[in-house]
Structure formats: C-alpha cells, structure tokens
Image: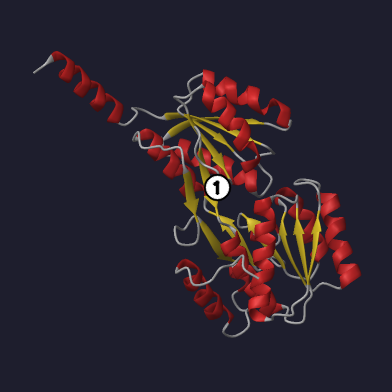
Amino acid sequence: MNATIAFYLINTLVLAAPTPGPLRVALLLPGRENDGGWNQLAFEAAKALEADGLAAVSHTNVRDASSFRSDLRDYASQGYDLIICHGGEYAKAAREVARQFPGRSILVTGSSEGGDGIATLDFQLWQATYLCGILAARIAPEGPAGVIGAQNFRTVKYTLDAFVNGLHAVKPDYVAHYQYVGSWDDVAKARQTARSLIDTFRVRVLFQNTDAAAAGIFDAAGSLPAFGCNSDQSGLAPDVVPASAAINMKRALRQAAELVRDKRFEHKAYVHDLASGGVELVLNPKWKDRWPAGVLEEVEKARAEIIAGKRDVLKP
C-alpha cells in the first residue's frame, strides 16, 4: 500500500473513533444552579452526564456578562471537549471565541442561530406553553389571565404569546394582561408584579417564565392556579401549579455529549420540540382529579396537531 494512502487511512480512523474516557465538559451558567428553572435544568443535566460516566464536568456562574468571553476563552484554551454556554444571549460572544479556537465543540443553549463555529439547542418551549393556555382557559374559563415574563427576550415572548394563543384556541375573546419583572431572580419584585395583576385586573389564572423569581409569583397566587415553565415547577407549589411547560435538558445535553464523543458534532441548530420529546407538558399529579371533563383529551388532540404541523402555536 502506498505510504501516503496508509497514513491518510490511519488518521481518518483515528478521527472517526469515539473519544476515549469521560469527556471534559465545561458549563457556563448566567445564574445560580438552584434557581428552580433554567440554570438548575442545565446544572442537573450536566451532572447526570457525570453520574453516568460520560463526562467530567466543571461549571462556573457568569453573573457579569462582560466576563463571559474571558471565561469561555479560559475553558477553550484548556482543551475542554464540550463547552456549554447556557443562554441564547451568549451566541454572539461564543462565535467570536470559536473563531479563535476552531477545533473546539461549543454549544449555546436556547438559540436557533447555529453555525459559524457553534452549535445551538433550539428549544421550542412555546409548543408546550400553548397547551398550558388550553388548560388555563378550561380551569379559569372567565379569566382574565396574568402573563409574566422575566425579561422581554424573543424566546420568552414566544412562550407568553403561545400561552395566550392557547387561551384563544378555547375562547377567542379571552383577556390576558402582560407584565415583565425585569429580573430572573428577584422574588420580591415578581411577587409584587403578580400581586399587581391580581389586584388591578382581577386575574384568575397566571402563567410565568421567570425561573427563580417564580417563587414570588406562586406565593402571590394564593388559591389561584399558576403554571410552571422551563422545568417541572409543581414541587415548588403543589397546590398552585397545575402543570408546567418543561424542557428535557438531560436528553438534549446527553445527545450533544454523545455527538462529541462519536465525532459527529456539527455546527448547526439542534431542534428540540414536542415531536422529539425535548420539550413536554408535565401535569401535576396532585391535580389529577381537578381537571374539567374532556380537557386532557382536548390537549392531547392539540399536541398531536402541533407535532403533525397542523397547528401553529405562534399564530394568533
């Protein structure tokens, strides 16, 4: 065999072979890992990789956005196999660092803008929040609804809008009032925001996408139902949270880690939705005897239509 050809074949086999041993995975979180929502999802999913022997995980909390690039560069320069930037707001900075370290596998969660040196996880959580809207319209048929976001990001607004569209699928004139807290972890301000909606507009049901600040909303809700988001938040307030629109982060990060291990990781957007199981509606078992007749069948029909592409949850 020609020596050049032999050298090429050997190197091709080496490059195609799975990475031996646990992957070195770095996780950059914009908030605390016990926030009961977005950040805790990623932290627990990364630790599950470690528990299964697939990865050795290092993580850091990047509270100051200005330090994100330097923290990411540090991990890239240390040769980590997979670097996870937890938040779509970091996509631009991740691309800049990726150009300096073209051999690294950099993953940005919560973004649809894959490519240019990075991969992204595109969580279409709004498909599940739409289903929450259907449930809300049935358990509080007269309304109105209070809809609360932490910050007015595109993906957050999609979850809120889809919830309202779910309300309107049941009752086209269902009234919903929007508010933004301005923070992901200010529990007191979130409580005040929810209380204002209840006192001012007499809302009868709440939906929120606020992570750690959700504790304040659940507290303010009192006897009113308030839906969970990002993770199954029923454990925070079992009598208040009927259901949650949740991301299956463990599935998503496992898929990414396995792609890196098997040398199949690509710089593109990996979509996670109801069809893939990457997002899901999680019903609170404590509410199993409280659903109006026929509503769960109605939700399942809507779910099937969303998966089949027959229902656009972002279309009013």
Residue at horizontal 25 percent and vertical 21 percent from the top: 11
Q: Is residue 290 visible?
A: no
Q: How many marks?
A: 1
Residue at horizontal 30 percent and vertical 26 percent from the top: 15
Name the outermost residue toward the bottom.
293
Q: Relative to residue 16, is residue 240 depicted above or below?
A: below
Left/right of residue 94 with respect to residue 2 in the rendered view: right
Q: Relative to residue 119, is residue 237 depicted above or below?
A: below
Residue at horizontal 56 percent and vertical 64 percent from the top: 281
Q: Nearer the viewer, residue 131 or 250?
A: 131
Image coordinates of residue 70 in percent, x first then y, are: 64, 22
Q: Nearer the viewer, residue 195 or 120?
A: 120
Q: Nearer the viewer, residue 272 or 46?
A: 272
Image coordinates of residue 73 in percent, x first then y, are: 58, 22
Image-quadrant location for residue 124 = bottom right
Residue at horizontal 60 percent and vertical 39 percent from the top: 86
Badge 1 crowding class, 10 Å Cα cut-off, few under 14, some 14 to 19, many 20 or more, is: many
Image coordinates of residue 201 in percent, x first then y, are: 87, 71
Q: Quadrant of the C terminus?
A: bottom right
Amino acid carrying label 1: it is: Ser
Give the labeled residue for mark 1.
112
Q: Relative to residue 37, is residue 98 depicted above or below?
A: above
Name the outermost residue toward the front.
116
